[in-house]
Amino acid sequence: PGRGDKQNGSTAFMTSTRSQSRKGRQPSRACKVGAGFWAYDESSPVVPRDIIFGPLKGDRATGAVIWLHGLDDTPESWAMRLEPERRRHPRWKWVHLRAPERPITCYEKMRHPAWGDFLDSGAVRVGSRDYETRDPKGWYAESVARVHRAIEALAAEGVPPSRTALVGFSQGGALAAEAALTLGARLAGWGLLAGWLTPRARAALVRSAKTGGLAGSRVLISHSSGDEQVLFECATLAGQKLSKAGARVQFAQLAGVMHVAGEAQMRKSALTFLEEVLDGTRAP
């Protein structure tokens, strides 16, 4: 399957902690990651085996990022790639949720880490089955509820939604959009990287447009014109609908690169966006 962003050899540093977390929730512990000033929390407030990085004990988080991977991927790969950004922001908390393995319809019910089902092995395009699916199995709804619980857990720790940003890639981007638009509270910002708006996200957007609830909301859309798995038209339509509803949309278009190949450039756009919405500055 190709809609995720799985990269071989990117999960080595988390191998031992993953095996420990299968035994159940473990207590938080400080450990050396990169420069050595991060705490690794082996017990997620949502589900065991999520990956959480936060300030060491005694330091209070001033902001938080929830990052959602794509189909057939894991949070370890993104945790590795985002390590330099964690160094830059020692007071941010990073929450990498892990999608459960599900029997995916278009892959002959083989199990893959996924937030929702895929009905068609072809590209996601406006009007396609996967663009229009009403989530009959309820998997997207379950995933949205997990994201909402993670946001609530951060608020209970002293990081309100207004200091929390949500970013997702591919199917994780579709989940991020639906979770943000159905939350009922304004986030610091949210990012849609090579993703699309689900039917529930589009319905929530219509309601928000009527009430003005999205006015001034910060949204990043980053997508490649050469994406062969989630077509660029998904991004352009999302941008149009969000802008019409009053959201403050930043649109970062990549030229000609394919779905997975564009991940590095999209990540750079997302990191600049995070600096703007959480710190009021721009990444160098």
Image (tube, rainbow, N blue to C red):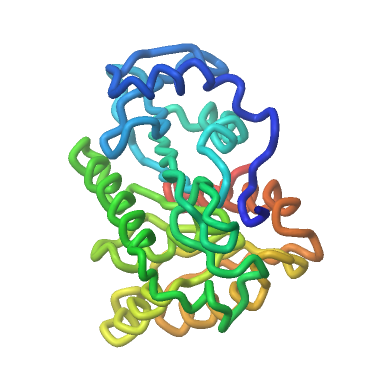
Q: Residue furthest left?
A: 156
Left or right, residue 108 beside residue 159: right
Left or right, residue 64 beside residue 156: right
Left or right, residue 275 beside residue 216: right
Which residue does the image show at 38% across and 22% down from the upper left? Answer: 21
The image quarter containing residue 23 is top left
| Along the line of sight, the residue nearer the viewer: 20 or 33 | 20
- x and y percent of residue 232 in the render? 67, 73
Q: Which residue lies furthest to the front in this view?
A: 108
Does any portion of residue 180 appear in the rendered image? Answer: no
Which residue does the image show at 64% across and 47% down from the upper left? Answer: 5
Which residue does the image show at 39% across and 34% down from the upper left? Answer: 50
The image quarter containing residue 91 is top left
- x and y percent of residue 180 in the render? 36, 62
Q: Is residue 121 above or below residue 143?
A: below
Which residue does the image show at 57% across and 51% down from the upper left? Answer: 270
